[in-house]
């Protein structure tokens, strides 16, 4: 790769609904990895889990409401516009065509990272992008207890510094410390089903939207 380019980040999820546990680590990655921009990609039909509760359009709207006005965040609709299951490998391949030699960083929470061996064509992901694991600050790789195939795939690929992401297009793995927020969409949905408030776990505009659509009840 000639020269060094600031990377483009990719953060996928069902975002059912999007919450501060997604948004704050995403923003910290944007800043700490010096990303040009971060694509937030809601999945249409998640292949690795049950069908979302909110429709793709509702999840997209919530994401748009959540990040409106935040420089560097791009809500990316490509998985929702594409037919069939939302495979990350396809998303990265289409982004790779757009960005040319620019490094791509796929940002994953630890649970998603440890589940990678179940993903479609998962071994190709590192040919298309770096992988950044957003993790508890101060934790080390040994604490991750990776399954054997994942250990094999990442061997020799660990990067110790975010600046190394700029020197190659793909193929590195970086552990990035982020503020831990013990928030999950599952917990938010359970609170709503129980008739409780989800306020302050997600942006106020998203909470208002959930109420106006009578979602998750
Ligand atoms: P659910 O509870 O329905 O499984 P979720 O809150 O885990 O949803 P997802 O849309 O499945 O959200 O996750 C998208 C990405 O965000 C994944 O990479 C996941 O690891 C990460 N993520 C989710 N919650 C957090 C959190 N609280 N802190 C850091 N990363 C998170």
Image: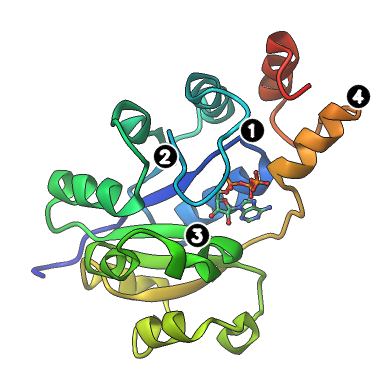
Q: How is the image coloured?
A: rainbow
Foreground: 55 or 131?
55
Label 2 belongs to which residue?
A: 41
Label 4 belongs to which residue?
A: 195
Residue 12 percent across, percent down from the top left: 45, 46
Numbered disc 2: secondary structure: strand
Numbered disc 1: secondary structure: loop
Numbered disc 3: secondary structure: strand
**Residue at (20%, 45%) from the top-left corner?**
94
Occupied quadrant, residue 85? top left
Foreground: 134 or 110?
110
Q: Are marks 1 and 2 in contact (CB under 8 Å)?
A: no
Total numbered labels placed on residues in the image: 4
Mark 4 vs ligand 1: CB below 8 Å: no
From this view, report whether residue 87 is shown above or below residue 104: above
Occupied quadrant, residue 182? bottom right
Residue 52 percent across, percent down from the top left: 58, 34
Mark 3 vs ligand 1: CB below 8 Å: yes
Label 3 belongs to which residue?
A: 108
The residue lying furthest to the top in this view is 212
Residue 139 percent across, percent down from the top left: 65, 80
Numbered disc 4: secondary structure: loop
Label 4 – label 2 distance at C-alpha: 29 Å
Label 1 – label 4 distance at C-alpha: 16 Å
Label 3 – label 2 distance at C-alpha: 12 Å
From this view, report whether residue 166 is shown above or below residue 42: below
Residue 48's disc number: none
**Residue at (49%, 52%) from the top-left corner?**
48
Label 3 – label 1 distance at C-alpha: 17 Å
Label 1 belongs to which residue?
A: 17
């Amino acid at each position: 790769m000639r020269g060094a380019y600031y990377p483009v980040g990719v953060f996928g999820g069902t975002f059912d609904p999007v919450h501060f546990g997604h948004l704050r680590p995403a923003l910290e990655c944007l800043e700490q990895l010096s990303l040009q921009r971060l694509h937030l990609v809601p999945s249409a039909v998640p292949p690795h889990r049950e069908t979302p509760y909110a429709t793709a359009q509702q999840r997209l709207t919530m994401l748009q409401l959540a990040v409106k006005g935040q420089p560097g965040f791009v809500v990316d609709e490509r998985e929702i516009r594409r037919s069939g299951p939302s495979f990350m490998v396809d998303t990265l391949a289409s982004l790779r065509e757009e960005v040319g030699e620019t490094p791509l960083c796929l940002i994953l929470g630890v649970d998603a990272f440890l589940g990678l061996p179940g993903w479609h064509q998962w071994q190709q992901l590192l040919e298309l992008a770096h992988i950044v694991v957003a993790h508890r600050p101060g934790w080390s790789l040994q604490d991750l207890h990776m399954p054997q195939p994942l250990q094999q795939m990442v061997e020799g690929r660990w990067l110790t510094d975010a600046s190394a992401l700029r020197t190659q297009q793909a193929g590195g793995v970086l552990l990035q410390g982020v503020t831990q927020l013990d928030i999950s969409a599952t917990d938010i949905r359970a609170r709503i089903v129980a008739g409780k408030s989800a306020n302050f776990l997600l942006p106020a505009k998203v909470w208002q939207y959930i109420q106006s659509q009578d979602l998750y009840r």
